[in-house]
Image: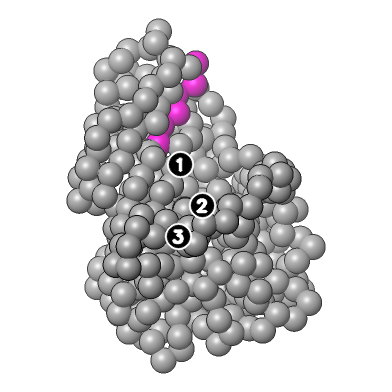
Amino acid sequence: MEIDLLKFTENGGCSAKLPAAELEKVLSHFPKINNKNLLVDIDTQDDAAVYKINEDQAIIFTTDFFPPLCSDPFEFGQIAAANSLSDVYAMGGTPLLALNIAMFPSNSPLTVYAKILEGGLSMVNDASAMLVGGHTIDDPIPKYGLAVIGLVHPNRVVANSGLNPGDLLILTKPIGSGIILAGHRIGLSDPNSYLKAIENMKILNKNGLKAIDATSVRGGTDITGFGLLGHALKMARASNVTIRINAHKVPLLPQSLALAEDGCIPGAAFTNLKYVEEETYFSPGVEFSYRAILADAQTSGGLLLGIKPEMASTALKLLKMEGAVESEIIGTVENYNKKRIIIE
């Protein structure tokens, strides 16, 4: 390997995000946009913007990028691209066009940069989208991601404001990748656990589209840097509901619980816990290790979807058929009652 990308930074992937609370302070100063065709904007802090073109089409517009979270440049490109494309899938859409957003040190071998781009291209191709250019800046710390445009029918947009009381919540990927990656850096994650986490992050969330279409899902998001708890909180606020999650039903990556129990908990998990603490109730029986995993910053995490109870079994069947084999029902949506999130 020409360069170990992990040597460039300690905070890679979506754990490099600014803390949610600080970001909300910045965004609060942005003026509200009034446009009848802007179906989803910054107000609900959703995964992407959605703009209606005509009665049958709307465009989804999003961007994501971050520093390396793994050593291999091709895998870094794959994961960063999968993470960027995920926002389009989370809104119920299909990716169409992508642009590279990249930073790379000019005094490092550009063959390494080329491998990052090749990894990204492989995922864009897998998404049946088109990579049509980009922009690169000379920077000491490599960073990579995509700006993506997707398409969706205006009446089929999946938004974080679309949950309804009575919905069941399905999570399509196991969590714990931030903990596994942190353990890898200090030699605690076993090779199989690390490989599983890497492969999990390379899975495109396109496997959720058939379930979304067949079961008329309208409430959803993807789980990334603010952890399951942080993104669930944003959904609960946007939908004005309470979300109840059974911690022991949440699918976990191998070894993530053991590492958390041993104290291998990244700083982003503590930041996310602080962000949700005022609006979250933890039952006394929920161990701190589980609280940490639920707040663990994920990169290219799964979809969290609100499903009508009568459609839940159909949704699970479709998800598993399409490759989201670890999808699980992890909770329910209730009328708002004092707290936005209840963990039991």
The disc, 3 or 2, on the residue closer to the chain's N-terminal end is 3
Residue at screen point 40% across, 27% down: 102
Which portion, as a residue range, is magenta?
140-145
Residue bearing the label numbered 1: 64
Image spot of residue 4 (x, y percent) = 40, 23
* Residue 143 covered by magenta stretch: yes
For label 3, the SS is: loop
Indicate the quadrant containing the C terminus: top left, top right, bottom left or bottom right. Answer: bottom right
Mark pair 3, 1: CA separation: 24 Å
Residue 222 in view in this figure: no
Image spot of residue 205 (x, y percent) = 35, 59
Mark pair 3, 2: CA separation: 28 Å
Amino acid tagged 2: Thr
Left or right for 283, reference 317:
right
Contact between marks 2 and 1 (CB within 8 A): the answer is yes
Residue 230 in view in this figure: yes
Instruction: Tell me the tag on residue 37.
Output: 3
Image spot of residue 76 (x, y percent) = 37, 35
Q: Badge 3: how crowded within 10 Å, few (<14), some, or many (20+)?
A: few
Indicate the quadrant containing the N terminus: top left, top right, bottom left or bottom right. Answer: top left
